[in-house]
Image (spheres, rainbow, N blue to C red):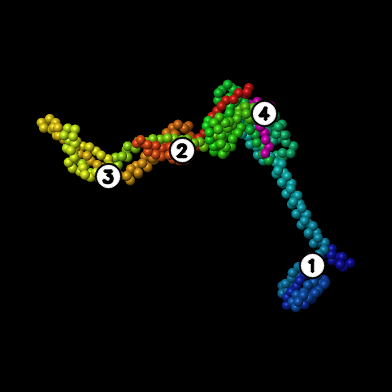
Amino acid sequence: MGDQRGYFEGVLTIEASGPLLEPFLQACTRRGCRITGLRRLDETTVRFSIRLKDWKTLRSLRRKYKCRLTIKEGKGVPFLYKLMMRRLSVAAAFLAALVLIFLAANTLWSIKVEGLTPELEAAVEKKLTSYGVSPGRLTIGMKDPNDIQQKLLEDIPDLLWIGVKKQGTSYHLYGVKKIRHDTNQDTRPSDLIASKKGMIVQTFIKKGRPLVSVYDVVKKGQVLATGELVEEGEVFVHTEGHVTAETWYRVEQELPLQQILTLTDGTVEAEYHLKIGSWSIPLWGWWRGNEGSYRDENVTTDWKVFSYPLPLNMKRVDHFAIDTGAMESSRKEIEKIGRKAAGQSLLQELEPGAEIKDEKVLHLSEEHGKVKLILLYKVYEDIAETKYISQGD
């Protein structure tokens, strides 16, 4: 009976250590503590069991007798109750977490409307609220997206078409405003097609359905975005947007080489001739020869007596040594000028907004007194052009 009563009250297994164990245990007994199962572990340590309600008495006496107490085990109904409550709290927290996750996953957090004017967008949001579709509400029991789409088309006369799509915890709507004057060239149903070959680097389709992505290589005339909003072909709009592509241009440029032939290093060798009619008699400097690269300049002195020309005159030939280093430097300068001129010429032919990203020299040569350049340019430009479509096709 005593063991059953202790089980209901709770039993603690204690280890006590210290120099005054015997006086400590005697003092506890005098205070009414019931000590059972006493067993000595070593000279300064014992293990025993007490009732849970006696623990307060042991704690009040431990400092006086300099004893160190350690709880090794707890048995009985109080401990089972505490364990059960702890497990219940964990279970309750787990259930609460599941409920919160379920509510979060089934709550509408946002509504995004695209393709409409601010006034029409506000009208759509107001109608959605009247249907019970608004952020913060549970999606359980909400109307099906197809039903919402049909209701919006019935209730808002200015809508030509609207798509309603549920994505996770959000609703995405894309609408098209009804155009009253379809004869306007700028609002007729149309596609965007490629004006030339290129690789797509950026797309921005304001209206219509895009058919290409970044890094796609397209051919001239290929459809980039269509005004056919659904594949069944029931709704057509005027497609608007930009498609930037990487295109390539081959440009040839020729510049005269004559301007670099006047470059010398300052060395001048003079040669003198006496001219008698059509005859030329060398007088000085003729033995130097013409070794190396030279540019010649002739200077003829006419002799006159009383304003009458004589049949004799002196001719001087100046041989200027050509500076080959300067010539090479000048060729590079001509190449630089040619590349700049080719780039500016290309930009004038391109549409506004086009940007040259890179250039490469494919060929550089001298032919017939000219420097010939062949360059390849990489350009980023908008290649989208409008092509009107017929709904009767």
Q: Quadrant of the N terminus?
A: bottom right
Return the residue at label 3. Answer: 291
The residue singled out by tag 2 in the image is 376
- Residue 393: x and y, percent? 63, 23
Please tell me which of labels 3 and 2 falls first in the chain.
3
Q: What residue span does the magenta drawing correspond to?
A: 153-167
Q: Is residue 61 visible?
A: no
Q: Which of labels 1 and 3 is toward the front? A: 3
Q: CA distance from mark 1 to mark 2?
A: 91 Å
Does the residue at mark 4 contact the one at mark 1 (Cβ under 8 Å)? no
Q: Are marks 4 and 2 in contact (CB under 8 Å)?
A: no
Q: Earlier in the sequence, mark 1 or mark 2?
A: 1
Q: Is residue 153 above or below residue 259?
A: above
Disc 3, disc 4: CB below 8 Å?
A: no
- Most distant residue in the right direction: 1
Question: Which mark, residue 12?
Answer: 1
Amino acid type indicated by mark 1: Leu
Whole-angstrom CA distance, mark 4 to mark 2, is 44 Å
How far apart are the two marked residues, 1 and 3, measured between alpha carbons?
Answer: 120 Å
Q: Secondary structure at mark 4?
A: loop
In front of the other: 224 or 111:
224
Q: Position of residue 128 (x, y in %)?
A: 68, 33
Q: Pointer 1 and pointer 3: residues touching (CB < 8 Å)?
A: no
Q: Position of residue 130 (x, y in %)?
A: 69, 33
